[in-house]
Image: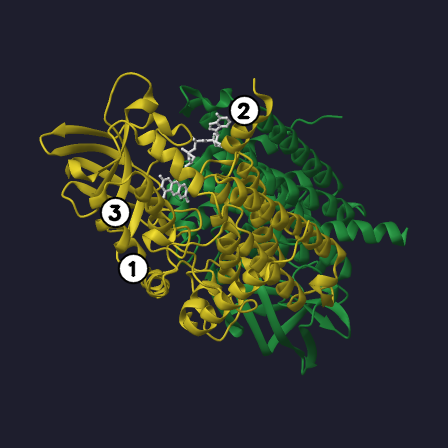
Amino acid sequence: MDLTYSPQEETFRAEVRAFLEAELPDHISAAVRSGVELPREIYQEWHEILGRKGWLGTTWPKEYGGPGWTPVERYIFDVECSRAYAPRIVAFGPHMLGPVIQKFGSDAQKQDILPRILSGEDWWAQGYSEPGAGSDLASLKTRAERDGDHYVVNGQKTWTTLGQHANRIFCLVRTKFDGKPQEGISFLLMDIDTPGIEVRPIRLIEGGHEVNEVFFSDVRVPVSNLVGEENKGWTIAKYLLTHERTNIAGVGISMQALEEVKALARSLKRRGKPLIEDPLFAVRIARVESDLEAMKITNLRMLFTAQKHGQPGPETSILKIKGTVINQELRDLARRALGPLAAPFPGHVIDGNLVMGPKDTDANAAVYFNNRKTSIFGGSNEIQRNILTKTMLEL
Amino acid sequence: MNFDLTEDRQMLSDTLRRYLSANCVIEKRNEIAYSAPFHSPQCWSEMAELGIPGALVDEAHGGYGGTGFDIAVVFEELGRALCPEPFLGTLLASRLLLAAGADQQDLIDGSVRYAVAISELDEPYDPAFMIASATRSGEGYALEGRKTAVYGGHVTDVLLVAAMLDGRPAVFSVEAKSAALTSYGMIDGGGAAEVVFDATPATLLIEDAGKALDDMFAAGRLALCAEAVGAMDVAYTLLLDYLRTRKQFGTAIGKFQALQHRAVDLLAEIEQARSITISLAAALGSDEAMPRSAMAKGLIGRVARLVAEETIQMQGGIAMTWEYASSHYAKRLVMIDHQLGDTDQCEGEIIRRYAAA
Ligand SMILES: Cc1cc2nc3c(=O)[nH]c(=O)nc-3n(C[C@H](O)[C@H](O)[C@H](O)COP(=O)(O)OP(=O)(O)OC[C@H]3O[C@@H](n4cnc5c(N)ncnc54)[C@H](O)[C@@H]3O)c2cc1C
């Protein structure tokens, strides 16, 4: 057992850090630090910077233009990016569709789609969930019916993250209407500006616009936009979910959030002393810090196994469950620490001269509420438990 | 022993519920609560006409209530509707006016609005550590310092301000228009203000205010606990309805035992929250009020967060949306912990008493 990084890994870390220092613009890290919703341009600018460096498809092998990183290198990249307040990479193109096209796409699809993801030119959205199909994704109803060289798509997707910024969307659609639901699903690509597609905003709990409903009425999609075989979309969907998981523990973001909480608790006061000296508050930090330290190792252990044996196993559900809970706990502390200073609605600007709390903390409550999503999406924590139960009990 | 409400209080509760379910339905409530002035002047005057402020004041001072149970009944109903009207300020002010032996007729009839300024940037919850101070100036006093999170301060006529006088907490009365007020809306709806005092003229209301402030805190915490209980009841009802009707995997999600047990655990916690609130209501006005308020508010802080987080989690994505009422209940339930003492502050108060005993 050896918990130190190899010399190559240390060199890699230094390289990533130097890149971030040189290439991550101040206005971008400042926007990330503030905790407010990022506009499209900020993501886009960052995607393009990463694209030029060849670091946008972090999971991609070299043959497709990726950096060919090991899981541990990807982890280091993630931690360093969080530490530097780089925007998270919007996962749908680089982390989700890219690997799918590499495994299931036709040559034409590979040539058309992959370069445009790598350069940041295309912004993909994920059209899986529907109003009636959340955890039970296989019950999805959006239908695609063949008409000559086209599919005609009708139905509705929902929760489409950042769909308002996307120019393309990959969807799971129903192409067979009898038999097992899983066996009638296909994986279809669409341009968002195709006639008949309408994107409508959903406002989230904290007031932000991050997700959307997408409506399809008689949308004509060329058959060449089908990925893999018709009615084999479920296999692709499952493959994609395992890829969605490599950074699922969000360790980098939690490490940064922990530092923020400590800094905040040093600068705020309670009963004449720094908040950090209040044992009741400090013990909350101590607990989550210990959990996070353990999580780092749990995460690395699982990455190590994946590196050795190929696919990550069902244990990654543990990363999702514990990782989200740790992150949510940290967001709770960042809100709690502020006391009444957490209350103002972040959009209602307070007179410029009247600062409420320490810098970049005015969205702390909003961020806390928004982050309740992490235990719901990408397979809720209950669904993760079901997956684990199945493999553990073998009943 | 009797846990039933008296007939009068039941009537008060019914009246208020009827009024709020007609005038403060969630869509309208959200419009009011999240845009300036973060409350409805019309609802405010109608509720004053219904006698809400009067229910918070005892008969000797012109009201018809003023006990812990009166306060609890009113705020539980406000909580059920997530009503953003700034009655917390009314209650806090009334307790201070009571301690000062001052007339409160204008508070009771709603013609003058009051808010109370306690919290500061460097001390949110404990008045013993305030920095804002007063000095004698001619006939009256002058205030210096800044107060934060003055609930209802965005629409008040009179501010009652806790400030140090000769090293001890005192309470002053200030005309709102003579102080520099900045208003804002809150993430869970409703409004507040920041107030900066710069040689602001003030009238002394209570010179040695330690006891009066304790009573005010106890009453305010009771109100917030009752509000939380009301909000939890509704949040829980929404959850149960959803568990019954939402179908996944061909069945109501309420059929999944993983959710059933958690729903039942929540019920147990909510009942505990209700009980500790009743315990505090009974203690209001006695020496036990302040320590009991620490227990109640500390417990409610834990339970309210749990109810907020679990109701979101167990309903899934829908509960993350602005459109669905549940999210607004969750926000209010979490943010109640940030008012008049969070769980850590309250548990700290309890612990310090152990050492002192
Ligand atoms: C902010 C946000 C962003 C999202 N982004 C996207 C996106 O970009 N693209 C996309 O396609 N989707 C997206 N989603 C959708 C997300 O994947 C779903 O919300 C998720 O799958 C849960 O589905 P649901 O919300 O319909 O909840 P439901 O499936 O209705 O579940 C409700 C509750 O029941 C529980 N439950 C369900 N089944 C079981 C069971 N068998 N046993 C025990 N408990 C169960 C759930 O865990 C949950 O607690 C997003 C969601 C959110 C909130």
**Residue at the far right in the pictured view:** B357
Q: Earlier in the sequence, mark 2 or mark 1?
A: 1
User: Closer to us: mark 3 or mark 2?
Assistant: 3
Q: Which residue is mark 3?
A: A110
Q: Chain of mark 1?
A: A
Which chain: green?
B
The residue shown at (76%, 26%) is B1
The residue shown at (25%, 45%) is A199
Give the image quarter of residue A101: top left
Q: Is residue B82 visible?
A: no
Q: Which residue is mark 1?
A: A119
Residues at circles 2 and 1 in contact by the CB criterion of under 8 Å: no
Label 3 secondary element: helix
Q: Is mark 2 within 8 Å of ligand 1?
A: no
**For the residue marked with disc 1, what is the amino acid?**
Ser
Q: Which residue is mark 2?
A: A390
Q: Earlier in the sequence, mark 1 or mark 3?
A: 3
The quadrant of the picture showing ligand 1 is top left
**Residue at the far left in the pictured view:** A148
**For the residue marked with disc 3, what is the amino acid?**
Lys
> How far apart are the two marked residues, 2 and 1, measured between alpha carbons?
40 Å
Q: Is residue A281 visible?
A: yes
The residue shown at (45%, 54%) is A69
> How far apart are the two marked residues, 1 and 3, measured between alpha carbons?
14 Å
Residue A395 at x, y percent in the picture = 56, 17
The residue shown at (34%, 24%) is A182
Label 1 secondary element: loop
